[in-house]
Amino acid sequence: MELYARTSYELAERLTKRYSTSFSLSSGLFDRAIRHHIYAVYGMVRIADEVVDTYRGNDAAEQLAALERDVMAAVANGYSTNPILHAFALTARQYGINESLIHPFFESMATDLTATTFTQQEYARYIYGSAEVVGLMCLRVFVLGDEAKYQAAINSAQKLGAAYQKVNFLRDMQADYNELGRVYFPSVQFEGFDETTKQSIVADIKQDFAVADRAINDLPANSRAAVRASYYYYYELLKRLKTTPASTLKTQRIRVPNWRKLALLAKAKLGA
C-alpha cells in the first residue's frame, strides 16, 4: 500500500503541474512535508473541472455525481482504485477534510453544467463552493490539524480564494462566454460589459485581496512563501486586467509573462 500511496501522490503532482504552469512555479515553495498533500487536493479538483469544462457528453451530470460519490467513498474507506482520488482521500483523512468542504465544491461544479447567468446570491454561493472551500482544504493542511489556527485563518483564506476566482472570471470572460455561454458576474451582460463595470469588479477584488494580504504573514512557515507567491501572481494579473480596456478583455485573454512570474517567485522566496 505504501508504494500505491506514493505513486498516487506522484500522479497527482504530475496532473496538477500539467494543467497549471503558474501553480507549478509557486508549489515548489511549499515545505516538502506538505507539498504532496496540496497536489492531492488540486488533483481531485482538476478532475471535477474536466467534467464540467471540457467533457461534452450528455451524461456529464451523472459523471460528476458519480465522481462525488467516489470521492466520499474513498475518504470514508481510505482507499480508491483511482490513484488521484486515493491520494486525496489519504490527505483528507489525515487533515480532517470532510463533506462540509467537499460537497459545496461539487455543488458549485454541478452549477456549471446548467447556469449561464448568476444573481448576487448565486454568485457568492458559487464562489464559496468553487474556490473558497478549496482554500480551506489547503488551510487544513497548512495548520497540520491545529483547529485554533484553522479557525483564526478561515476568513482570510476564503477571501484569498474568492479573489483568485474573481480574477479568473475577469481574465477568462471572453472564453467563458464564447465557449460556454457563461457570464459569472451578477447583473452583467457580455455585450454591455464596459469600463465602468470592469472597474467596479476590480475594486471588489481588491477588497478581498486586502483582507487576505494582512493574514498571509501569519500562515505557518510551511506554506507562507508559496501562498505569497500565488498572491503576487494574481495581484499582478489583476493590475494588468485593470489597465486593459474592457473591450479588449472581451476578445483576448490577458497573461503574465513567464519572466515576470519568475521575478514574483523570487520576490516571495526572498521575502520568506
Image: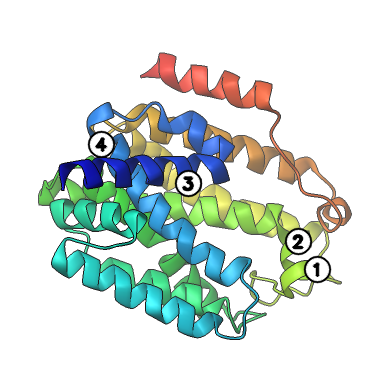
Q: Which residue is mark 2?
A: 175
Q: Nearer the viewer, residue 155 or 75?
A: 75
Image coordinates for residue 23, horizontal then vertical, percent:
50, 38
Quarter of the picture holding the C terminus: top left
Q: Quadrant of residue 2?
A: top left
Label 1 near label 2: C-beta < 8 Å?
A: yes
Q: State the CA–CA distance, disc 2 to disc 3.
A: 23 Å
Q: Nearer the viewer, residue 95 or 207?
A: 95
**Three-letter amino acid code at disc 2?**
Ala
Q: State the CA–CA distance, disc 3 to disc 1.
A: 27 Å
Q: Which residue is mark 3?
A: 15
Query: Closer to the N terminus: mark 4 or mark 2?
Result: 4
**Three-letter amino acid code at disc 3?**
Leu
Q: Which residue is mark 4?
A: 34
The secondary structure type at the circle numbered 1 is helix
Q: Which residue is mark 1?
A: 178
Q: State the CA–CA distance, disc 2 to disc 1.
A: 5 Å
Query: Closer to the N terminus: mark 3 or mark 4?
Result: 3
